[in-house]
Structures are given as C-alpha cells and as structure tokens.
Amino acid sequence: MKRGNMTGKKNLKSAVKKTMLVSLLVNSVLILAFLVLSYAEEINVKEKIKQLAEIQTQFENKDFKERRKALENLSKIKDARKPEILKKALKDEDPIIREKSAIMLGKEKTSVARDILLESIKSNDESLRLGAIGGLGEFPKDKKAVSALIGLISNKDRNTRWKAIETLGNMKSNLAVDALLKVVKEEKEELLQKSAIESLYKIGSKKSILALKTLTKNKDEKISKWSENVLKILEK
C-alpha cells in the first residue's frame, strides 16, 4: 500500500511539473508574441511618421505634378493627422488638388472632416465648392450634410446646383425628395430637371416613387416621359 501511495504521489508530482512547464511555455510564447506585435506596431508608427513627413515635403514642392503625387500618396495612408494635411491642401494653387482634397476629406467620414466641408461649400472657389459637395456625399445619414446640400439646390451657380442634385441622389436621402421634386417643377434648365428625376430614381423610396408618379402627369411632355421611363425601371 505504501509503495502504491508513493508511486501515486510521484505521478501526481510529475503531472503537476508537466502542467507548470506547459503553462510556462504558453506564457512565454504569449509574451514573445506580444513583444513581436508591439515591435511591429512601433515600426509601423515610425514608418507612417516618415511617410507623412515626406508627403508634407512633397506638398511644398513648386511643381503641381509633385503636389498631386503627394495627394495620391496621402490617399493610401490611414492616420488621424490626415484631415489636417488635407485641410491645408484645400488652399493649394492647383484647382484639381483643391477639389480632390475635399473629396478625400469626405472619405475620412469624421465630424471634423464634415465640418470643414460644410464651411468649404460656402467658398467662392468653384473647384473647392464642387469637391466639398462631393465630399459631403459620404455622409448620407448626417442631417447637417443633407440639409446643406438641399440648400445648394437654389444656388446661383448652375454647376453647384447640378452637383448638389446629383450628390443628393447618390446619398439616397429621403429628406431630399421634396426639394428634388421642386427642382423638376421650377428649374428652367432641362439638364437639371432630368438630373433631379434621376436622383429621385436613385433614392428609390416609397416617397420618391410617389413623387415620380405625380410627375408623369406633368404638362411638360419631356418631364412626364422621363418620369415614366425611370418608373418602369423601378417597377421591374
């Protein structure tokens, strides 16, 4: 009996030692993995800082082509400092850079980016204004963004009105239906009327479909025909 007890105790001690060794090994592996990940993250952060510094230097280049490359390189990076760099780019001499920077700001989808764009749509600079409208299109559920774009439908500038109409359709916001319906009925330019009908079609809600149905009875044959055509597509 004593030998049996001794053997049992030895086996128990051996099992405990093995368990402890396994536990120690697992912990060591976890610690090593954590250190590797931490080191990799540190390298990644340093690399981002280096990339951003290079991009900012590129933006200072007198050659607009180099600055456009800087904007393209910036589009490939995800970083909290990105909106601030884009905000500065909104003042670039090159209209394409200003417009694209505004569009890129929208893709950040932050409240900071949205607020910058809401200010930018008030600009007298058409390139910046149109880019900002496109950027706000990235905020379909944001009432401030939608309301601001609805307000631009009555802007004096034709291109601004058109861009706002198109963007509201892409946003599929039901809040824009009444404003778009008003455009079709009151806008003098056929291109903008047609664009508003297309936006109502893109929204595709019950409310927008009802609006399109009322337009099929419009006295203007072109308006009624355009509305009938998009309704046929929606009802398929």
Image (tube, rainbow, N blue to C red):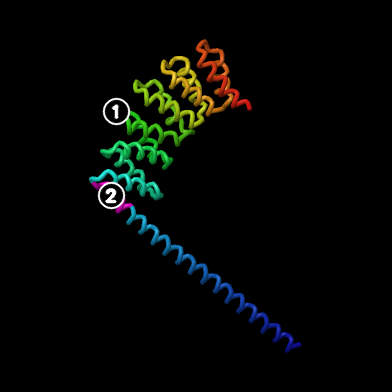
User: Going by the image, does 120 lie left or right of 228?
Assistant: left
Counting residues from the N terminus, which is met first, the one under dot 1 or under dot 2? Answer: 2
Q: Report which quarter residue 109 is drawn in.
A: top left
Residue that extends furthest to the right in the rendered view of this protein: 1
Mark 1 is surrounded, within 10 Å at the Cα level, by few (under 14), some (14 to 19) or many (20 or more) other residues, namely few
Image coords of residue 198 (percent x, y): 50, 25
Mark 1 against mark 2, which lies toward the viewer?
Answer: 2
For residue 72, above or below residue 145: below
Type of residue at label 1? Asn
- Quadrant holding the C terminus: top right
Mark 1 — residue?
124
Which residue is pictured at 47% across the width and 18% down the height? 184
In depth, the one of 29 and 204 nearer the eye is 204
Mark 2 — residue?
58
Q: Which residues are magenta?
A: 52-61
SS type, badge 2: helix
User: Going by the image, does 149 lie left or right of 98?
Assistant: right
Image coords of residue 67 (percent x, y): 29, 45
For residue 115, above or below residue 15: above
